[in-house]
Every structure is written in C-alpha cells, then in structure tokens.
Amino acid sequence: MAEPFFFIFFAGLISLIPYVVDRLYYRRWAKEGHSTFWLTLVYPVSVTAIDFFSASGSPFGSFGAAAYSQTGFTALMQLTAFTGIWGIPFIVGWFASVVNYFWESGFQWTKIRSGALTFAAVLVLVFGFGFGRMLLAEPAEQEVKIAGFSLPEEQLVSVLGLGQGSEEEAFREAIAELHAKQLEGVRDAAQNGALIVVLQEAAGMGFREEVEGFLADASIVAREESIYLVLPTATMDPAGKEPFHNVVHIIDPNGDVVLEHYKYGGTQFEGSIAGSGELQTVETPFGKLSAVICWDADFPATNKQAGEQDVDLLFIPANDWREIRDIHVGMATFRAVENGTPIFRQTGAGVSVVTDAYGRVVNRIDIFEEENAGPWGGEQMVITPVGSIETLYPIIGDAFGTLMLVGLAGLLVGQLVFVWMKRK
C-alpha cells in the first residue's frame, strides 16, 4: 500500500509547479499589473509538461491525465490524433490563461486585440479540424455484427468469494456452472447472428484444469457456430502462492487459438503475471483484430502499436467497479481517436462501449442501470464499424508532450539565469 500513497503524494507536490512557474514569470515580466500576451503560454506549457511527466512511467498509466476531463467532447478529442492526449491540457490551460489576461487588461480591446485574435485563430483551427474530421469521415470499411456480455456483479463476487476462502470444491463446482452458462450464452449470441462474441475480463476463471477445459469447450462452440470468440481467462494457483495468469484469447471458426495476450497494465497491484506489452494481431475476413485487457488501455504509448499495425478493431475486455466506471470507459475511447482504431470494450461491473475510429460512441451499456438488469450484465449486440484510419500519433508518439517538457525545463533554466544575473 505504500507505493500508491507515495506516488499520489509526490504527484500532488509536482502538480504545484505550473502555478509557481507562472507566478514567477508574471512577477518578473508584468508591468504595472499588466502582462504581455506571450506570458499566457507559461501556464499551459508548464501544466502540460507536468501532466505528461506524471503519466510517463507511472504504474497507473495515464490515470488522472487532464485530457480525460474532456471525455465525450469528440470535436476536441480529435486533436489527440496528432498530439496524443497532451494537446488537450495545453488548449484548456491556454484558454484559462488567456481569460485571466483579458481580465487583468480590463477587457480593453486596444490592449487585448492581438492576443484575442491569435487565440481565436488557434481555436478555429483546432475545432475546425475536429468538426471537419468527423463531418468528412468516410464510412467504415465494413460493419460486423458483434455480441458481448458480462457476468452480473453479484454472481462474480459470489464465485470469487468461494475462491478466496477454503471452499475449493464449492469453488470448482461454481466455476463449472459459470463456464457452462457462458458457453450457452455464446451459442445463443451466435445463433442470433453474431459473427464475433466477446466476454468480459476473467470470464474463464479457475484453476488450470478448469481454464484448460473451458478453452477446449469454447473452441468446440466456436467451430460449431463458425464464429470468432474473444475469451479472457484468469488461471489461479490452488495454493495461492503463484501470481495468476490474466490472459485474453481469440479463437477462430476452426476452433484454434490464434491470439494470446497477457495483461501488462497494473499487474503489480492485482497480483498477476505481467505481459510483455507487445500487441498481438490476427488477420481475419473482418480485417486485422487485436485485444488488450482493461488497465492495458490506460497506457497510450503502448497502445499506439494498434495504430502502427493498422489494427481494424481493438477488443478491450475489462472489469471495473461502480465508482470508476464512467471515467475508465471514457479513457478507453481516447485510444480509438489516437490510433484511428474502432474499439469494442466489454466490461464487468462497469460500462461496456463500442466506438468508431473517431471515438464516437456507437453503443454504451452501464451494467448498474436498472434497465440493463438481466441474466447477463452489459449485454451488447452491435453492428460494429470495422476498419482503421491513418493518424499522426502512432508515428510521432508523445513528441508534443516531450516538447512541453523541454519547454518547462527552458522556463526553469531561464528563471534560474535571471536570479543568478540579478545577484551578480
């Protein structure tokens, strides 16, 4: 528990840096309470640099990044196709700084005219690009009927409770029943026209024998129904001494496992074996498919492999909890925009979502809403857009965030030089 505490404490301290830097430059360069327009850039550069620094190398991924406050504002989200999520805090921070500049200038047009026109031109460019990109978007290369369903929260909690106790036999029996029920659900979805069926994170849980049996039975169902099956599993050690294996498999219509991905995000906190972070892909009649698991999608720099490899559809089986469900699903939608890749997120105890390659929501199901109650949680049957589009982010990565970090370093050095010269 100490690691998360110190991380949050440290993050809180460094989050003060943009405000300190902004005030230092204001005191140095403002004349008689009036600042020049270039000073409005000090805060956005600083706040973006700290946002980038805080998320880079963090074991939590990009959790807490400022861009996620704009989830659902798809016109602004399009900026991430070029700058990654770091362009958004820059624009938002600059807006705040410019408004403050107007206020301090008494909103006198003669003083603020050039600054106002400059910032307005930038906003027109950003939003013109965002709205234009969506309005001029080509239809998806193809559409595929995909089904997904999750376990009801209470059922999942009940089964996990047996596994964490000493009731091994009862746990095995509950798992067998759960697996059989899910395979029946897969078959029903296929017979209702689904060409791909997706289950939530850890849908196939249990000890090695149970998981291997579940995979074998799932392969038979996939072959008999001629479907692709996205099947996450969690293999546990009966003695509880070894980390568990949190894996997602894609099974093809021949019953073969054609993709296997180990979770890499947040594994040190949940106690599972860490994956390599290398994205696996499989060519299908529906295009190139890939899959990551839940927390994996919170690492933009790793997920840009989806854009580099022109993935046509990214599956994100996940498992959340009530308090984070909205922000976590919103974070995942940014991966679609950055990489030009539609996503299909099937979530237990949270929100399941399908988006197109522009981050526009095609379908959204909150498992906690009363109208979604039923034998399954978060049940989806969606005509899903499939097909990648080119974006700049997979090519340049976090260059914009790095540029802001260099800018902050320059501001700090500049301040130190000024202090040194003043003393001299």
Image: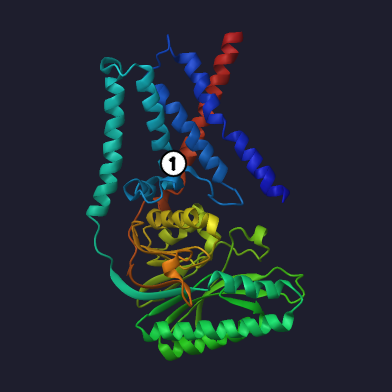
- In the image, taking residue 174 as reference, residue 201 lies left or right, namely left
On the question of residue 11 being in view, the answer is yes
Q: Position of residue 182 (x, y in %)?
A: 51, 81
**Which amino acid does the dot numbered 1 rest on?**
Phe
Q: Which corner quadrant of the image does residue 196 belong to?
A: bottom left
Q: Which residue is mark 1?
A: 400
Residue drawn 42% across the image and 48% down it: 396
Residue drawn 51% across the image and 21% down it: 23
Q: Position of residue 170 (x, y in %)?
A: 70, 82
Q: Position of residue 45 (x, y in %)?
A: 46, 32
Q: Position of residue 318 (x, y in %)?
A: 52, 65
On the question of residue 424 being in view, the answer is no
Q: Which corner quadrant of the image does residue 277 belong to?
A: bottom right
Q: In this view of the protein, which residue sits in the foreground, 168 or 280?
A: 168
How many labels were placed on the picture?
Answer: 1
Q: Which corner quadrant of the image does residue 278 belong to?
A: bottom right
Q: Is residue 11 above or below residue 165?
A: above
- In the image, taking residue 120 as reference, residue 31 lies left or right, namely right
- In the image, taking residue 351 as reference, residue 158 lies left or right, namely right
